[in-house]
Amino acid sequence: YFDNGNQIFADARANHYAVGAYNINNLEWTRAILQAANETRTPVLVQVSMGAAKYMGGFKFVRDMVADQIDAMGITVPVVLNLDHGDFAAAMECIDLGYSSVMYDGHKLPLATNYDQTAQIVQAAHQRGISVEAEIGKVGENQDTNSGELASVADAKKFAELGVDKLACGIGNIHGIYPADWRGLDFDRLAAIADAVDIPLVLHGGSGIPKDQVQRAIALGIAKVNINTEFQLAFQAATRDYIEQARDLDQAQKGYDPRKLLLPGTEAITAKMKEIIDWLGTPAVA
Ligand code: G3H
Ligand code: ZN
C-alpha cells in the first residue's frame, strides 16, 4: 500500500520542488487529503502524530484506516505513511506495523542520545525498507516569540552520514500560528546546511509561512513541507460557516447529520491542499 518516499523526495530535492506532508486527525482529514492527491495526480505523504494516533485509537488503526481508504477511494497515486514527531517507542511500533516512513524526533534529548537513538531507528527501519526522518535544532513551538533553535551544519553532516533519509532542521520555523513579530526563515543557515548535505531537507511548521519564503526554501533544498494547522483553520472556518448558514435547514434537510455537517470542512481541506500543491510545485506522476 505504502511507498517509502525515498525516490519521491530525492527527485523533489534534485528538481527543486517539494512534496507536502499532511497531518491527519480523523477519517475526514484522511479522505480529504487522499482526494486532493488523487485529483491532482500528485504523490502524497500522509502523516500522524503520536497525539492524533492516540486520539484515533492507535497506530494500527491509523495504518488500517489509511490503507482501507486507499482501496475504497481507488487512490492510484503513491502514498507514503509517516509517523510524525515520534519518540523511540512509537517509531519502533510503526516500523513493526509497516508504516513506510517514520520521523524519530530526539531533538529534545542531549545530542549524543538523539544521535544514538536515531542510529538504532535507522538500522531497524532500513532492514525493512522503511524511510527515516530525524530532527536537529529545534522547531519553535506554537506562539513562541523566539524561533526555536537553528540546526548546526556540523550536526546536519553527522546525521546525514548516519544514513537518515530526510532531515528536519530548525531554521527559524515554528509549529502552529506564527507570531506577528516572527523574524522569518534563516535562509543563510538553510543554504549552509543544504550545501553540506544532499539528502532531502524538511520544513516543519509549514502553515502560515508566506509563499515567497516557502518557495525560496524549496529552491535551496527543502523537499518536504509539513502542513497541519492550515487544514485545521480551513476546516474550522468552513464548518463555522455551514453551521451559521444552515441552521434554519436543520429540520427540513437534516443539516445536523454528521455526514452533511462535516462535508464543507472536508471539502475545504481538499481545496486548501490543492492550493498548497501549487505553491510547492509538486508535479503530477508520470
Ligand atoms: O509536523 C508537523 C508540522 O510541522 C506541521 O506544522 O501545524 O505549523 O503546519 P503546522
Ligand atoms: Zn513538525
Image (cartoon, rainbow, N blue to C red):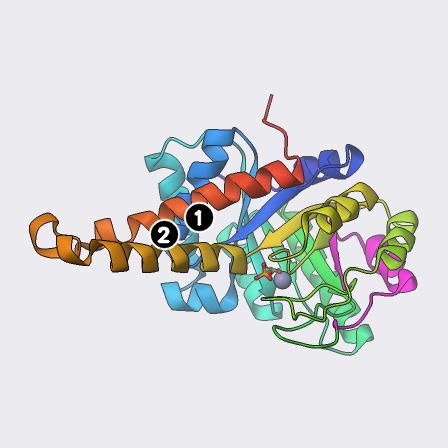
Q: Name the residue under label 1.
A: 269
**Quarter containing ligand 1?**
bottom right
Q: Which of 84 and 21 is in front in this view?
A: 21
Residues in magenta? 147-170
158 inside magenta stretch: yes
User: What is the x, y in percent for residue 60?
Assistant: 42, 57
Name the amino acid type tagged 1.
Ile
Name the amino acid type tagged 2.
Gly
Secondary structure type for disc 1: helix
254 in relation to 57, above or below: above
The reply, left or right, for residue 81 in relation to residue 184 is left
Q: Does the residue labelled 2 lie within 8 Å of ligand 1?
A: no
Q: Which of 198 and 173 is in front in this view?
A: 173
Gap in Å between the C-alphas at discs 2 and 1? Answer: 6 Å
Corner quadrant of residue 75: top left
Q: Residues within 10 Å of mark 2 (few under 14, many from 20)?
A: many
Secondary structure type for disc 2: helix
User: What is the x, y in percent for residue 35?
Assistant: 42, 38
Quadrant assignment for the C terminus = top right
Q: Which residue is drawn at 55% across and 40% down?
A: 275
